[in-house]
Amino acid sequence: MDDISNPFFELAAILIISALVGLAGRFLKQPLIVAFIGVGILVGPWGLDLLQSIDKVHLLAELGIAILLFAIGLKLDLTLIKSTGKVALLTGMGQVLFTSFFGYIIAIGFGFSTMTALYVAVALTFSSTIIIVKLLSDKKEIDSLHGQISIGFLIVQDIVVVLVMIFLSALGAGSTGSPGFEIAVVILKGFGMLAVIGLLMRYVLPRLIKLLGNSQELMTLFAISWAVALAAVGDWLGFSKEVGAFLAGVSLASTEYREIISSRMTTLRDFLLLFFFINLGAELDLSLIGEQIKPALAFSLFVLIGNPLIVLVIMGLMGYKKRTSFLAGLAVAQISEFSLILAALGLQLGHIDDNTMGLIILVGLITIGLSTYMILYSHQIFEFLSPLLGIFERKEPFRESKVKKLEEELFDVIIIGLGRYGNNIAKSIERSGRRVMGVDFDPGAVERWRKKGRVAQFGDAEDPDLPESLPMKKVNVLISTLSDFEINMHLLKILKHHKFEGRVVLTQHHAGNAKKLIDAGADMILFPFVDAVGTGFLSKLDDCFDKEKAACDGNKK
């Protein structure tokens, strides 16, 4: 459209279209990545042809990638990998090796060259940390066992992708020497850069950050400057802007201001990444897509089915339940923005052509779009597939279950939800001489409970098999301190299905929902902001321990 010749008007039009398409994507419950690539197609030469300032958009796209890698480095929490044990490392590396190997075999089967097959195979291995964290956060599963394991092996993937970028950048260094020599040179440069950054981290950055801490505006400006500067240095040294920006983030990850910097970077990162995905969509040659449909569908099915399967196998062998393995496996059922960045790097280095770039983008659109729905409806999908998933679970999934030991013990109360409220309830009940067992989906909460000398185990209130791992037949009262109405309603259905004969005490904040839970079979409702956990609470709960009484006193509320 020639009438929009002013770059400012062009940008305004693109942003308005992006907002509208993004809104449509939200209604369809799709990540903005899919919507923004669609915007690129819409405003590019195959659509409205609004995008004339392609060089400016490309610069903004590069800034977006730098800020993304900076943010990933800033949030890199190696203690998370440690907290989830070896499962994060073994699952992450196992999935990367499995997907790379079989992805390469499939690519060769389609007649791709060795270099092209290598790029396609590697692109298939990486899953989107940003998308998974967002979806798990929305579902309040970020602290669950499968959530922590998922984030753990996604961090492993993030580290691997940085190493792959160093390797590929070395191959494209353009020297007349051998590839091995070029890789060695780049690695030496990398160690030199790491040494300099290490010295800055030790002697300069902590003091500088503290000095800037009084002004959030200056701190934000410094963070952006630092990210872009190291990205430029990384590019100059020959191991890509992305790696330099990543190291910039890592260098500030140990400072006490990293959360403040990270929160300030989020909005800027999301805004600038818009231009990266628009740039990808605009450069996508739709005339080539017809040739790529068959391989794209094959690779997409491989990612959607093969990646979760290998996670199921590895975690099953390590002793995890099929439910935890399945839910964690869904986190790798898509390729990520890193896959697209990697492909763009390969295109820039001349390792792949536009056809391959289009193929990887098409696989990204398919897998990101479908896997989003798979994660949103993960529990329903698991219940449907559960009978078929038994082969991926050991006879005794020892990582999560202690059934044999617990069957020999007698507990008066099981408390689901080991936060502050659950802890206070446990203290009150224990003072009356009754034995309490705790259950929580956060491994950290379970560990804290055990350190207090109490019995606790991992468990999810939405797991249909939860009662099978608990000594339910000997328990008089089960208390849920979770205030989510849907979870409590689901818990009631599970307990009814397993014919639990004890009393069920649930937690709610709203009287209307409390009545619905009572009607559904709850014996008593706790109101945390009304009931004080003390003698009054215990007098109400006493009726629940007396099975001769028709109901708990809490029914009257």
Image (cartoon, helix red, strand yellow):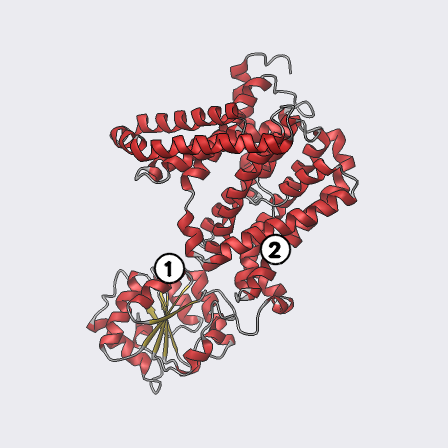
Task: Give the residue drawn at x 50%, y 54%.
Answer: 88
Q: Secondary structure at mark 2?
A: helix
Residue type indicated by callout 1: Gly
Task: Give the residue drawn at x 29%, y 61%.
Answer: 420
Task: Give the residue drawn at x 54%, y 55%.
Answer: 90
Name the residue beneath numbered marker 2: 308
- State yes or no: discs 2 and 1 in contact (Cβ < 8 Å): no
Percent across and percent down for residue 279 are 60, 26
* Left or right of 190 in this view: 125: right
Cα gap from disc 2 to disc 1, whole angstroms: 25 Å
* Left or right of 125 in this view: 237: left
Percent across and percent down for residue 106 are 74, 46
Percent across and percent down for residue 443 are 40, 61
Q: Judge the density around disc 1: few (<14), some (14-19), many (≥20) Cα neighbours within 10 Å.
A: some
Which mark is drawn over residue 206? none
Relative height, residue 271 to residue 90 (above, below): above
* Residue 25 seen in the figure: yes
Quarter containing the C terminus:
bottom left
Task: Give the residue drawn at x 53%, y 67%.
Answer: 319
In the image shown, does 258 or 40 lie closer to the viewer? 258
In the image shown, does 536 or 341 lie closer to the viewer? 341
Percent across and percent down for residue 349 are 64, 27
Residue type indicated by callout 2: Pro
Q: Judge the density around disc 2: few (<14), some (14-19), many (≥20) Cα neighbours within 10 Å.
A: many
For the image shown, how many numbered marks are present on the structure?
2
* Residue 269 seen in the figure: no
Relative height, residue 544 to residue 193 (above, below): below
Relative height, residue 508 to residue 164 (above, below): below
Name the residue beneath numbered marker 1: 444
Pick whichever of labels 2 and 1 is earlier in the sequence: 2
